[in-house]
Amino acid sequence: MSELARLTDLAAIQAAFGEGAMTTTGVGKVQAMLNYMSRLPMPPIPPMALGLQPKLDMLPPLPAVEAGARIASLNVQTFNQTYSLSPPRVPILSPLMALNALKNVLADILGVKPHQGCPVCMG
């Protein structure tokens, strides 16, 4: 992997400085660029970024997160098969259904549509 990284670095240098980047003149150009870059002032680190580092340090390592994701994806089918949800019986449901039926019957007797006032009330 380190050899591949070196080849990648060399390819990036060649792309930036041309085919003659590995010659004595090319190496001088690269060195001059590095010297120039080292003298540039660094901007201050924003305070919010400094406060973020302790939070990032609290995170588990990436291999542990990936292992957890693999285990979760393997167990999702088992979880879906065993997990069932049935709504609880609500004690008020029966009286509400009776009131709804009564409302429908009264609306039919009075000749009005549901959610519409009676002709006497609506004037």
Image (cartoon, grey):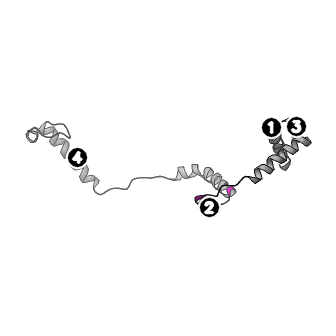
In the rendered image, residue 35, in percent from the top left (x then y), is placed at 80, 51
Residue 5 appears in view = no
According to the picture, the residue beneath numbered tag 3 turns out to be: 20
Which SS class for mark 2? helix
Camera-near label (4 vs 1) is 1
Question: Which quadrant is the C terminus positioned in?
Answer: top left
| Badge 1: residue crowd in 10 Å (few <14, some 14–19, many ≥20) | few
Camera-near label (3 vs 1) is 3
Give the camera-side residue of 109 and 40: 40
Counting residues from the start of the chain, the first of labels 2 and 3 encountered is 3
Give the camera-side residue of 25 and 63: 25
| Badge 4: residue crowd in 10 Å (few <14, some 14–19, many ≥20) | few
Q: CA distance from mark 3 to mark 4?
A: 88 Å
47 over 13 or under it: above or below: below
In the rendered image, residue 52, in percent from the top left (x then y), is placed at 60, 60
Q: CA distance from mark 2 to mark 3?
A: 42 Å
Residue farthest toward the right in the current orientation of the protein = 24
Which residue appears at 64% of the width and 58% of the height?
45
In the rendered image, residue 97, in percent from the top left (x then y), is placed at 25, 49
**Which residues lie in the magenta part?**
48-62
Give the camera-side residue of 30 and 50: 30
According to the picture, the residue beneath numbered tag 1 turns out to be: 15
Counting residues from the start of the chain, the first of labels 4 and 2 encountered is 2
Q: Are marks 2 and 3 in contact (CB under 8 Å)?
A: no
Q: CA distance from mark 2 to mark 1?
A: 35 Å
According to the picture, the residue beneath numbered tag 2 turns out to be: 50
Camera-near label (3 vs 4) is 3
Left or right of 33? Residue 78 is left
According to the picture, the residue beneath numbered tag 4 turns out to be: 100
Counting residues from the start of the chain, the first of labels 3 and 1 encountered is 1
Camera-near label (2 vs 3) is 3
